[in-house]
């Protein structure tokens, strides 16, 4: 029997982007029937009436808006964890998936193993997925980005974590993801969500430009094995999660892992303590606009405009 899935978008200010999300999901739901509801969990900004009306027209009876939430991130996550669906999907509003990728992701729910805490896709600038995305979906620019940006990144202390050990001489001439993640795992701090992509806004610009100019090649899914990893990758930045709701609640209510009011640290500490895997669907690309460390919101707005335009005009079959 197919698993019933609830999808939850965590929204803040990128209201125009929500139209692209709704548009892609509407095409996906013609091919998969296990999506029960699509929720938009609104922060203090809400969603303007015009955008809301358009989303309701696109998704019809599937859509739900919940606007009573503040900007309390954990409160939104606990709402997701209270879903009575078989699986819940949490996706930040600054992430974008094509309808084809949505179909593959929903179908991939059957690939979740008992030891998998969650399933995610191949996030373009994600931690730890950006190296996989370059290798599997953007190979023509991989060498350029690695040499120009990754190898030249200077790591320094930030947010209480000291990343200077990542300035390893063996990473300066040739980028070695395996060595990099080994060094990250040795950092004695819960903030292990570090990568040149998180520090280098310029690298994000180059990658996003390549994606926009080669949309079909980079953003459509490929048939590839799902990675079930317990050891290689020490940390995941959770812009996208497919999980059993009860497990998400276990993560959120584990007092020993409560750290900073977000889910990133508790998720990774819980996974490590339980010896569970992260499952990565490396063939399913998910575009994440940029990390908030850069705060280049004017650039992001222009990027979103272009993605919305592409979504409205592309072939969804």
Image: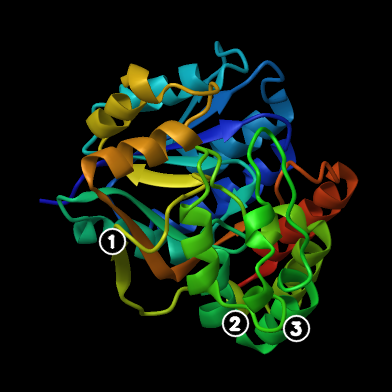
Query: Who is closer to the viewer here, 122 or 229?
Result: 229
The numbered mark, 2 or 1, whose residue comes first in the sequence reads 1
Give me the residue at 56% from left, 46% from top.
22
Work out whether residue 289 can be spotted.
Answer: no
Where on the picture, by quarter, is residue 120? bottom left
Q: State the SS at label 1.
A: helix
In this rendering, the answer to whether 228 lies above or below 138 is above
**Within 10 angstroms of label 2, few (less than 14), some, or many (20 or more) residues?**
few
Give me the residue at 69% from left, 45% from top.
17
- Between the residue at mark 1 and the residue at mark 3, the CA separation in whole angstroms equals 34 Å
Q: Position of residue 146 (x, y in %)?
A: 69, 77
Q: Which mark is residue 217?
A: 2
Reading the image, the residue beneath label 1 is 107
Query: Who is closer to the viewer here, 97 or 133?
Result: 133
Give me the residue at 32% from left, 31% from top.
248
Q: State the SS at label 3.
A: helix
């Amino acid at each position: 029997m197919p698993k019933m899935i609830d999808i939850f978008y965590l929204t803040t200010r990128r209201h125009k982007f929500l139209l692209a999300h709704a548009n892609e999901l509407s095409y996906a739901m013609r091919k998969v029937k296990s999506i029960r509801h699509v929720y938009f969990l609104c922060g203090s900004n809400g969603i303007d009436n015009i955008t809301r009306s358009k989303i309701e027209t696109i998704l019809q009876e599937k859509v739900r808006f919940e606007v009573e939430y503040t900007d309390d991130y954990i409160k939104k996550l606990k709402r997701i964890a209270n879903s009575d669906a078989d699986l819940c999907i949490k996706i930040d509003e600054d992430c974008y998936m094509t309808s084809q990728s949505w179909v593959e992701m929903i179908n991939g729910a059957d690939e979740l193993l008992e030891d998998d805490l969650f399933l995610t896709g191949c996030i373009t600038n994600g931690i730890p997925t950006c190296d996989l995305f370059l290798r599997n979906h953007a190979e023509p620019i991989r060498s350029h980005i690695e040499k120009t940006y990754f190898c030249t990144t200077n790591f320094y202390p930030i947010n209480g974590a000291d990343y200077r050990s990542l300035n390893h001489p063996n990473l300066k001439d040739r980028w070695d993801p395996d060595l990099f993640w080994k060094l990250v795992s040795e950092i004695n701090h819960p903030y292990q969500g570090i990568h040149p992509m998180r520090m280098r806004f310029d690298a994000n610009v180059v990658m996003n430009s390549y994606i926009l100019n080669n949309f079909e090649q980079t953003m459509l899914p490929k048939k590839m094995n799902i990675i079930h990893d317990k050891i290689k990758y020490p940390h995941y930045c959770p812009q996208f999660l497919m999980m059993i709701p009860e497990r998400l609640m276990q993560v959120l209510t584990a007092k020993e892992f409560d750290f900073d009011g977000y889910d990133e640290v508790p998720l990774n500490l819980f996974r490590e303590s339980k010896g569970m895997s992260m499952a990565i669907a490396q063939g399913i690309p998910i575009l994440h606009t940029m990390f908030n460390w850069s705060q280049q919101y004017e650039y992001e707005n222009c990027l979103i405009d272009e993605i919305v335009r592409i979504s409205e005009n592309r072939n969804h079959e």
